[in-house]
Amino acid sequence: MGKDIRYSDAIAAELLRRIADGASLRTVCSQEDMPTRETWRQWLREHVELPDQYARARAARAQERADEIVAIADDETIPVESRKVRIDARKWEASKLDRANYGDRQHIEHSGAIADGLTDEQRAKRMAEILRAARSRKSPTVATEQSGEVAARVSKMSKNPKP
């Protein structure tokens, strides 16, 4: 039979503190004084402040893992291969807990022509038509004026590309 732990701010705060200190949700929720993981997920849905607090606790846990990496790397009593495995495990965990700070970064850059088969002038005209159609639902006069301005700007940009 599962644990019957009712929500309280104190229990939620303690759970978040343990996670921020480096414990996993599985470990924390397996302890007798804490809710089950299913109960925790229910609390996250029911209490609007908890998801942000949980995200901050996970970010703190990621920082704990990053701090451990340095300590493990500097500990010459641990065999080199064991250090490498432990460091890699913590790097992976930190990257999943806090992608913004520890995750792999991807930079995507586009260069070259747009391969749609249109000339710059045709593309500008088509963009103006799309804008006109979208704006016509609001005000036909404004749509016509703005679509003409867009076409002129796109045409000018294609003739004077930035370096």
Image (cartoon, rainbow, N blue to C red):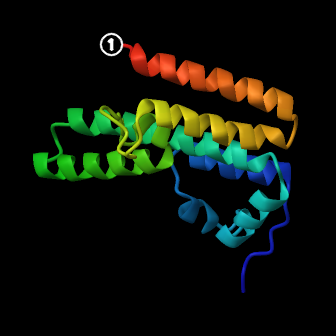
Q: How crowded is the residue under tag 1: few (<14 C-alpha within 10 Å), some, or many (20+)?
A: few
Which residue is found at the position 80% from the left and 74% from the top?
4
* Residue 94 drawn at (x, y percent): 42, 45
Quadrant that contains the N terminus:
bottom right
Quadrant that contains the C terminus:
top left
The answer to whether residue 130 is left or right of residue 83 is right
- In front here: 105 or 70? 105
Which residue is found at the position 40% from the left and 13% from the top?
160
Which residue is found at the position 41% from the left and 45% from the top?
95
Query: In the figure, residue 65 lies in which quadrant?
Result: top left
* Residue 28 drawn at (x, y percent): 60, 60
**How many dots with numbers?**
1
Which residue is found at the position 72% from the left and 25% from the top?
146
Query: In the figure, residue 6 lies in which quadrant?
Result: bottom right
- In front here: 19 or 146? 146
The answer to whether residue 63 is left or right of residue 75 is right
Q: Residue furthest left?
A: 80
Q: Which residue is mark 1?
A: 163
- In front here: 137 or 31? 137
The answer to whether residue 38 is left or right of residue 78 is right
Question: Could you tell me which secondary element the residue under label 1 belongs to?
Answer: loop
User: Which amino acid, by three-letter code, is at mark 1?
Assistant: Pro
* Residue 85 drawn at (x, y percent): 22, 53
* Residue 119 drawn at (x, y percent): 40, 35
Q: Is residue 43 above or below residue 59?
A: below
Q: Is residue 32 above or below residue 161?
A: below
